[in-house]
Amino acid sequence: MKGTLMPHRSGRRARRTLAVVAAAALIALPVGAAHATDTAPAVVAAEATATPEADATTFRIATSGFVDTFNPFVSIYLLPTNTIRYVYEYLVQNSAEDGSPTKGLADDWEVEDDGMTWVYTLQDDLLWSDDEPITSADVVYTYEQMMTVPELSVANGNLVSNFESVEAPDDKTVVIRLKTPQAPNPGTEVPIVPKHIWEEIDDPATYANDTDVVGSGPYVLESYSANQSITLRANPNFWQGAPKVDRIQYVYYTNSDAQVQALRAGEVDFVSGLTPTQFQALDGVEGITAHSGEGRRYHSISINVGTVTRDGQPYGTGNEALKDVNVRQALRLGTDTETLLERVMEGRATPATSFIPASFPKWALPADDDVIMAYDPEAAMAKLDEAGWVVGASGIREKDGTPLQLRLLVDADDIIEQSISEYFVPWMQEIGVGITVESTDGDTISDRAVKADYDMYFSGWSVNPDPDYQLGINLCSTLPTGTDGSGGTSQDGYCNPEFDAMYAEQRSELDEEARQQIVHDMLAMNYTDTAQIATWYPNSLEAYRSDRFTGFTLQPKDGGIIASQAGYWGFLTVEPVSAEAAQAEEGGVPTGLIVTGVIVAVLVIGGIVFVLLRRRKMADVE
Amino acid sequence: MTNTVPPTEEILLAETGSDKAPRRVSALSYFLSKLGGAAVSMAMVILLGFFAFKILPGDPVAGIARERQLSPEQIAQLRSQMGLDKPLWQQFTDYLVNVFTLNFGESYVYRTPVAELIGDYFWNTILLTGTSAVIAITLGLWLGQKAGWRPGSLFDRITSGMALVLWSVPTFWLALILLMVFGGTLQWFPTGGMTSPDPPTDPLALVLDVAAHMVLPVVTMVAVVYAQYVMVMRASLMEEKSADYLVTARAKGLRDDLVRRRHAVPNALLPAVTLMFLHIGGLIAGAVTVETVFSWPGLGKLTFEAISGPDLPLLQGTFVVFSAVIIATNLIADLIYRRLDPRVRRG
């Protein structure tokens, strides 16, 4: 190499520096890599002994969910709240069978004073995961924090807004006194926290609660690494006994296609939220079971019924024609949801009757109810004729010179909404209704939905086992207070005083059968009023490594879902197929793969360096 | 000059003004004018950072309320926590204070200061993009000078052809294909993340673990960007090829290879250096797609997720930081170029 750089001493230091840097990079890389291969066997040995998790069975779930915090008082995103379900037991749990109230911390409850007072008795010998006893003081502490500290009511404040007081006459009894009588069990959905931990925390509202959490559920949160993983460990003190899997680990994947690949590669054991295409691709793959379960969501086309504020002031840009219930019913009659369900959803959904999903059979409006209207374009046209809309020259109906032309907002990113509109537009054309599809982004749609700047848009909610909340957001009192749509939480801008009266009635009806009848009547009324066309309850598409794990509990038990339950049943009963199977992919990436990677890198970079060096040498020889 | 490199005004000045009377641009005024330009750009970015995201459709609280059953009281509580109940001018002054104290406010989703989040993810992005940049630059320059020395040869046609094909491939698509083939099917490399879910405790094993996770994203990034270095280096070398000093070098009896390596390449490197600096800033911001596909916990992924929130403070923070990095590297490129190329100093 003698003197190769000599001819350039004429002040071109910068260039030389660059050459040196480049050379250094070239040399450093293969040296580092070669060093790595030398020590690789040693690493394999070291890893086997160094990882304490070698014997633990770990069930890995791919996720892309947001995490705000694991603080049960303030967490509102789906992933952390679902995790919290596994960490803290409620006073009353939602059953796996149908979501109805079942034994939680309390194994018995009495309703007194016509629903004004609820008395709960806790189970015997309950322990927190740190072996401290669980007592009624913990329950009282939790509820009182939510009732008295506004910052701690962010997540679940609505669940205690009817609470007058919570008392603990003894260690095992909790008495909840309400402001108004209430039929829905007030002990559900609120995670009870350990008083002895939380009262020591200076500012509970900002406490992250993400390491070594003390809990009462089947799993406790062990550690959290943002955008990387969430690790839960089995709680031996859980009242139903410790789960059979030692750890549950959520692993982050931003991209849902990557999640599918991770499942194929065995890096994760469970994925959810699959698209039909992904589901199809995984169905039938060896070692993987694809599961399509009846979810707790409904999907609908929301109709602008002529929005008004709470004190009756009209707002928004809804088409006048839609104020007529006959026109709205005609839209429903002209929509062939059965065909949509087959063509768009490939049958992976249950036809909807209302906004209460069929997976809560106690409350959902039965499909054979008298009010249900089947697809009938003739009847639709008769309704429109009756409403005074006559077919004009262009085939679009008119009334007083105004054509019946409606806007449908479609999320350009949502393939399902787009597919539906392709069927919907010609069907409406057939009955003489013109549809203008306005394709835009989801944020714009929610913005316009708030301002009532629409005639129709696609909507949907996840519904809880008790229908009270969902019925409640169809009351006149949830309409907005401002003409810009502010101050409201209404589902479809629906308002019917009769419906409101029945709502109050069901809320205090302690006889479950009677309450069930009222709820059905309410849903039937809402159906006839047609503030939305509920299309279906989409199935939740999930897949898991059935060569490694088995024993998932569905909610509802018959044909339900595994993840995103209103409860902790899905992963509670999961167990390894065999001890070996669960160990197969332990420790994430097998070291062999790492070695392969390094060898490939060495070959590539080494090859380049070899060529370079050889050329240099040849030059020197000459 | 090739049209792939945006010429800085100095290069243009050097080229067009060379026949005019020599005019020495004072170092200080040059520096000040560049600095002033950068400051104006930065001020615009800060203004834009507030107003551009304010007019985005979508209310962050409405976004949350759609997924969870919230009462009006809870919604009001959230709005006040996020400062959304304040008048616009007050939100703007809050924002300015946050920017100038380098704090950027608190993320709506993560509930932590944005500056802290960016700090946490910054080095992950640098690790990924830095490695890719070193490999892409080395590979690109080496292939480019080889190809440029014998344009039209088989080597040149294969190299340029390959480079251009990969350059035209959509990053997202290439990343997904690599992920499917090498991650899902062959299972040679992990399908995502920066480490295994249970990272090894041994430091060396950890390095290997991270390296294995880096392979696919780095290959993707290199594949889509190395072409520009190939093309710039190739064109630049072709220009130098006919220069007189190469005739001299050949006359000295130097072998063709040495003429290329010792004489032509160093001169041809100049435009490539400019290109490198112009792209350093872009590299940091440009990792969004790759980080998203491979779930790499970096700034790109953070930005991607902030958009779907919408997590305004986080979006503003990453926007201002990305822009600041690009403005700063462009400024450095201008200054360094002046050091490297004397023609810029003597107009």
Image (cartoon, coloured by chain):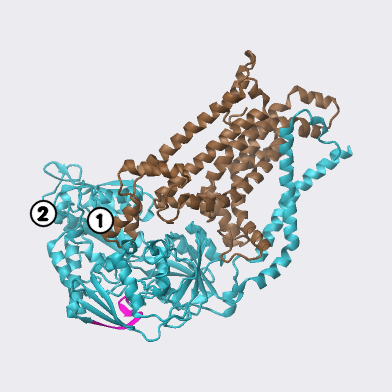
Q: Chain of mark 1?
A: A
Q: Chain of mark 2?
A: A
Q: Is residue A542 above or below residue B264?
A: below
Residue sticking out furthest to the right: A621
Around disc 1, counting alpha carbons within 10 Å, would you say few (fewer than 14), some (14 to 19), or many (20 or more)? many
Task: Specify the amino acid type for callout 2.
Answer: Glu
Residue at 37% over, 86% down: A124
Secondary structure state at the residue bearing disc 2? helix
Around disc 2, counting alpha carbons within 10 Å, would you say few (fewer than 14), some (14 to 19), or many (20 or more)? few
Towards the viewer: B302 or A155: A155
- Within the image, what quadrant is residue B138 found in? top right
Give coordinates of residue A369: x percent, y percent.
Answer: 19, 71
Towards the viewer: A444 or A35: A35
Residue named by callout 1: A302
Residue named by callout 2: A386
Of the chain colours in the picture, the one used for chain A is cyan
User: What is the span of residues highlighted in magenta in the rendered image?
Assistant: A98-110
Residue B116 lies in the magenta stretch: no
